[in-house]
Amino acid sequence: MTITENQMLKNDYYELSDDELEVLFIIDTDPIMRTRLQKISLLYSKIFDTEKESHGAYFFGGYSDNIDEASDELVDKGIIQETNQGYVITDYGIKLKKMLIEGLEDSDDLITGIANIKKSVSELDDKSIIGLTYHFFEETTTNSTIKASVDRYNKRSIYDGKSLDQISLDEFINKLKKGTVIHRGG
Amino acid sequence: MSYYSKLVYYLKIDILIVVLLFSYLRKYLFLLRMQCNDTMTASRKVNDEFILKPCIVSLIDVLGSSELLLRGIRQDNEMYLRNLSNMFKFAGKYYPSDQIKTFSDNILIYDEDIEDGDSKLSKMVNSVAQMQYQTVCDLGLLLRGAIASGGLYHSPNDSEFDDFTIGDGLVTAYNLESKKAIHPRIVMQDKLARRFLNGDGDDSLLRKQGSVYYLDYLQTTLVDGFPDESLLSNHRDALIKHINTNNAVEKNEKWDAVRLKDVWCLSYHNDFCSRYDAEEYIIDYTEAFDSKGDCIEISVRGRY
Amino acid sequence: MVKDYEIQGIHTIANKEETSIVRNLTLKVGSNKSLSKMSRCLDRSTDKKTLDISGPILNECYIPLTLDKIRELDRDKEALDYYILSRAKYLDSGNINVLSIRLVLKPQEKIEKKDYEFINSLLTWSRNDIYLVPTLEFDGVIESSEKCNIYDTFVKQLLEDKKTWTNANSGIMIPSYYPRALVDNLFEMYKDEGSRFVAVDFDNKRMDKPSQTIGTIVRHFNSKDEGAFMYAVNLKPYKKGHTDESAWDIYAMHGTFNAIGPTHPKPRKVVLPNDWRSAGRVFDANNVSYPVLDENHRDCFFNWTEKNYHFRFEDDYSKNTSGVYNYLKRYNFNQINLLLSEFSKAIDKGETEFIDEMVAHIPPDMANTKITAVENTSRRKRKRINDNLGVI
């Protein structure tokens, strides 16, 4: 019995776990590195999934093994692919995502929420996103081997004309929720 | 001896003989089974062919060996030999022993350069960079070497001449190491460097100085673009210790060459710290005549 | 030479909520080898001493291959012997040896008749005990439906050719990408084989989807009223970077697995700190967990090493040689097998107290997940779709 693409789409539509859905909605046609994926996922969990302690304090700051495995699983299923520039969605993944956007119930946080977070940090490079997560979510940095370096980087960092000490957590989260673009510098 | 005692005595000897015979028989049967039954397929044995296979070759030389050995201080020799042995073990972490050859203070690492060789090239560059960092920090040894591609022949494991290795790849690497590297760095053949930069490897591992590409091995201390300060601190401390050790030895006519190598390492370390905003780890040093005015010494003062 | 195997003496204990279904059974291979306890397979760091302490176990001989490598080894018997024997240890120590082949295919590559011959000759090798069908992996991007179709063709052809090599029953391999809903498709291909040895490839991930593939397998064999020896290939033992230190590999036993293999992680460029945190995690049998090797957990490991190898590690990590990791793996191998041995005895004797203690250590994330659930109800809800993939 030959397995068809439709059968796989139907199977994946029903079978993807919540973590896999999260990864699928973070990844797009523009490549995204593993670190950036982890940090955006951290931001998402801090806004929308506050009860679950999804990210632990790893050697590189906040890290979720579930998200790591979910991305490996999606690569395995051909929904995303891993290149040297990062993860990218495949044609098959695009079809699946479209089905899920129509079919998922009560998932505004997932679809719109993630889109707004991504928009908000779209002008920031990976180092800036890392710096922001280290500053606002210090509890995830206790085991980090680069904390001192990142702290020094953060001391010099200005976002929308303000230093990090001048930006409150609420202000930061509101920008992420609304999709307000954050700029590094003045 | 009573009859009973004699019986027991001879019985014990008999049992011992039987046990010994059995163990030899078992060993013989085991070896026989290994040779006869251990055939995977009915494939014919291939004749030995003397062919140069395309390989990626790294030839690395440990600096300072001849000066140290000629000084003839036993304790120094012992520590040096131990360090050299440990360095070869570092290579063993990345490559199997049949891809590593050692002779004197040189180490040769090679990997077959197959059609889809970019991952192998990437692995070689990453591994050698890690090894270089580890050798400086853990063993206080400076390396100079080259990575090149070309033909290489290496004798099989069971051949009459062990470690018989030769080829144009090795010759190219040797020429690069002896003529172009100059400083304690590992340089790369031009065309290989261009291939690496155009391929899937981590570009940041290669740096260009003038017309020469070399391994920027301190990149191995970076995580997501941020330096791991403990690793940078280890490197700083290791270099300071290395230089103080050199300062303590009796100077001879080769001292200037030694000093130039040390200065290069210090400059490289400091440049890296500047590039990655880790000024705290820059080594403050000066060069000045020693107290007798016989030669120029390096004085290090640790933190910037 | 591969022999027929059979499953005997099945003891099953499920808790009321079915969040744990543990089984112990005897796997008998030929006339002279059998295994009557759950086990953790040996790996590259295992030495004779630790193997002797643990007793006979399932011995996974992990052989990664490509078509280029197969064709190269097929031409050179000595290179072949060296390649295989350097990856297959303790073949004569009374363990049940299973060659676990992973064949990686490049895009557009085709497996040819000679390649099938080679694979069959390898699988029917004198030192291999169970004919386990290999898994296929794919280099590059390939549609998942195509992966499954290629794998189906591979299995069919291999089993067809197998008939000229051996009559022994084969073991089923379920690749990590094979969808749950279609696993019965795969079982169908083995219907004449009498297969009751099932290897599930986790591809270095944790077992956390019992409602999917595992549940399907358990229901399949339960419905036929047969047991199966379930073997977890390349299963990740714990979550990285997390406060949850639960032993996720032991959780596999609650999902009816009988043996867990070593991990074969994908190479990743990771810069680790030069302290005990990077040495790896130590297995704590009392809490069925993998804590970091901090001050509180080092003594057991140091004492064990001192007792068995007559040296003691330094407290200062940087003063130790690079051998820490290998000794830690040996220690873990030993501790896990001791625990699994106790677990097996408890199941055979119906010692529910011990089993309840083990159930109490199921990872918190999975504590309410039914092993044979058809659907994972904790997932986000989706609308139904029709056969044309339109939302209903």
Image: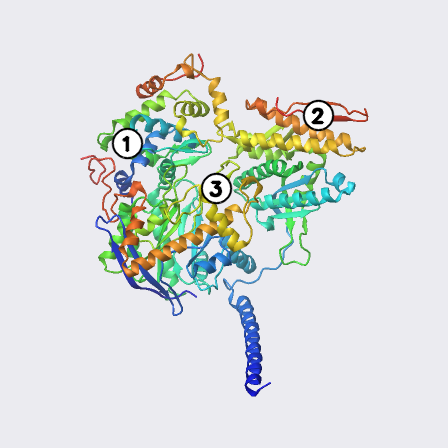
Where is residue A107? Give x, y as percent. Answer: 25, 29
As drawn, the label of residue C267 is: 3
Dot 3 surroundings within 10 Å: few (below 14), some, or many (20 or more)?
A: few
Q: Which of B60/C343 is in front?
A: C343
Residue C296 sits in quarter:
top left
**Comparing labels 2 and 1, the label whose residue is closer to the camera:** 2
Given the image, on which type of amino acid does mark 2 rest? Answer: Ser
Which residue is label 1 attached to?
Answer: A98
Q: Is residue C284 left or right of residue C385?
A: right
Chain to which the residue tagged by mark 3 belongs: C
Q: Is residue C361 left or right of residue C329?
A: left
Given the image, on which type of amino acid does mark 3 rest? Answer: Pro
Where is residue B142? Give x, y as percent. Answer: 67, 36
Q: Which of B61/A143 is in front?
A: A143
Please tell me whether residue C320 is drawn above or below residue C310 in the rendered image.
above
Labels 2, 3: one chain: no
Q: Which of B122/B189 is in front?
A: B122
Distance (Cα) linking label 2 and label 1? 66 Å
Query: From this viewpoint, which residue is outermost toward the left?
Result: C392
Given the image, on which type of amino acid does mark 1 rest? Answer: Lys
Chain to which the residue tagged by mark 2 belongs: B
Which residue is label 2 attached to?
Answer: B299
Q: Is residue C42 left or right of residue C257?
A: right
Where is residue B283? Give x, y as percent. Answer: 63, 25
Dot 1 surroundings within 10 Å: few (below 14), some, or many (20 or more)?
A: few
Distance (Cα) linking label 1 and label 3? 33 Å
Secondary structure at badge 1 equals: helix
**Which residue lies at the image location 23% right of the left edge and 33% below the top edge?**
A103
Please tell me whether residue B57 is drawn above or below residue C190 in the rendered image.
above
